[in-house]
Image (cartoon, helix red, strand yellow):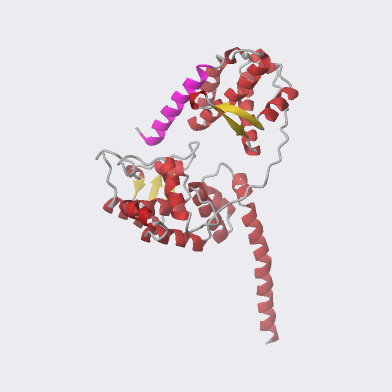
């Protein structure tokens, strides 16, 4: 079974466990969501959000969670929704061991929770469980900040990769342990920096996903994207080949995962996060670099080099050109400012030629 299929199974198990203690219509909601293209991970996040919302409503009505009926949901109004979103500004949520921990929600977090609640209401309205949809016209007043893209420039990328290859980015103790994973870590960072793939896509790659002849990977895209092909440049190909030939040693000879952990099994997302942090915390001290920031680095540098937002969007496998434009608007602004300086310089050059 492929990695992403295993993750889907695990996520569906978590979803089933969650809805076991929720109203019966949640079974239909999950079936409704799984018939579309929404990933199981996204559905799991939606169910978590909906559970929090239904718990709030249950507390307000002083009833068990399972008794929050469709009729109750239909008769909520904008004041009820305002009360919920005011509540999640700062509240205590349950964690493992029946402990409660202080929790807040960012503006994007609130927007996602509203999207989750909307999806539940849309399902209920579409299937006739409610006759009116009170959340359809509800507007959440958010103070959304313009996203700031943290990315490395070319010099920083070169410094990081040199630190991975030589170990100079590490402390003495780290360097000793990293000797056993130097080729893997080089291949891992090289692949993400040269392709912009997501960390979840990266850990899911199997050996048979690599097409050495055409220099490309078959990647299971987030949300089941239309184009699974990710092309490789020579740097990434060489790094992967060196790693596979010199260092890849799985515990099970039948293990197909490309990137192997120290214990011989497939690397986890959290392990990749630790590897990235280890090599960047000292080499790029002014920026907190994560696997997603490697993706941002790829996108930023590709857009700066080409000025082509459509190419950048396609390479990043974004859902729409608008998503790419919103993320890289600051890059576009810098390029437009640079453009007027370039043309000014060009005009002055021509002026000097005319004078001569």
Q: Image point 55% across, 14% down: which residue?
A: 24
Is there any visible trace of residue 215 in the rendered image? no
Q: Residue furthest right?
A: 79
Q: Is residue 3 magenta?
A: yes
Which quarter of the picture shows residue 129?
top right
The residue positioned 42% from the left and 28% from the top of the image is 10
Snapshot quadrant of residue 61: top right
Q: Residue at x 32, y 52 (%)?
A: 243
Expressed as whole percent of the image width and height from the top left, the position of residue 144 reads: 68, 42
Q: Nearer the viewer, residue 146 or 209?
A: 146
Looking at the picture, does residue 331 appear above or below residue 91?
below
Indicate yes or no whether the magenta region holds residue 10: yes
In the displayed structure, 30 sits above or below 325; it is above
* Region rendered in magenta: 2-21
Please name the predominant secondary structure of the magenta segment in the image.
Answer: helix
Say whether residue 66 is left or right of residue 220: right
x 58%, y 27%: residue: 93
The answer to whether residue 133 is left or right of residue 123 is: right
Task: Tell which residue pokes out farthest to the left in this image.
Answer: 253
Provide residue 13's location: percent of width, then percent of height. 44, 24
Give the side of residue 284 with respect to residue 325, left or right: left
Residue 142 seen in the figure: yes
């Amino acid at each position: 079974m492929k990695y992403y299929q295993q993750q889907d199974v695990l996520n569906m198990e978590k979803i089933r466990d969650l809805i076991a203690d929720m109203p019966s219509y949640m079974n239909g909601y999950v079936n409704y969501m799984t018939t579309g293209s929404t990933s199981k991970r996204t559905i799991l996040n939606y169910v978590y959000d909906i559970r929090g919302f239904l718990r709030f409503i249950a507390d307000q009505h002083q009833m068990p969670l399972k008794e929050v009926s469709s009729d109750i949901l239909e008769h909520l109004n904008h004041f009820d929704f305002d009360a919920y979103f005011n509540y999640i500004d700062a509240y205590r949520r349950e964690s493992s061991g029946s402990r409660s921990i202080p929790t807040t929600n960012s503006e994007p977090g609130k927007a996602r929770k509203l999207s989750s609640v909307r999806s539940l209401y849309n399902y209920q309205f579409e299937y006739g469980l409610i006759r009116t949809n009170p959340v359809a016209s509800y507007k959440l007043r958010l103070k959304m900040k313009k996203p700031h893209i943290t990315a490395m420039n070319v010099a920083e990328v070169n410094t990081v990769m040199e630190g991975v290859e030589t170990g100079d980015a590490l402390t003495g103790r780290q360097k000793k342990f990293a000797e056993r994973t130097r080729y893997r870590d080089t291949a891992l960072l090289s692949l993400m920096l040269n392709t912009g793939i997501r960390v979840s896509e990266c850990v899911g790659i199997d050996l048979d996903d690599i097409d050495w002849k055409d220099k490309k990977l078959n990647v299971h895209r987030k949300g089941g994207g239309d184009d699974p092909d990710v092309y490789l440049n020579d740097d990434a190909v060489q790094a992967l080949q060196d790693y596979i030939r010199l260092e890849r040693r799985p515990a099970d000879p039948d293990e197909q995962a490309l990137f192997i952990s120290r214990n011989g099994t497939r690397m986890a997302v959290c392990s990749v996060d630790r590897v990235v942090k280890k090599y960047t915390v000292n080499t790029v001290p002014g920026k907190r670099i994560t696997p997603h920031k490697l993706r941002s680095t790829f996108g930023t540098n590709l857009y700066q080099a080409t000025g082509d937002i459509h190419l950048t969007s396609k390479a990043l496998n974004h859902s729409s050109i608008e998503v790419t434009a919103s993320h890289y608007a600051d890059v576009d602004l810098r390029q437009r400012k640079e453009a007027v300086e370039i043309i000014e310089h060009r005009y002055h050059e021509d002026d000097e030629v005319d004078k001569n």
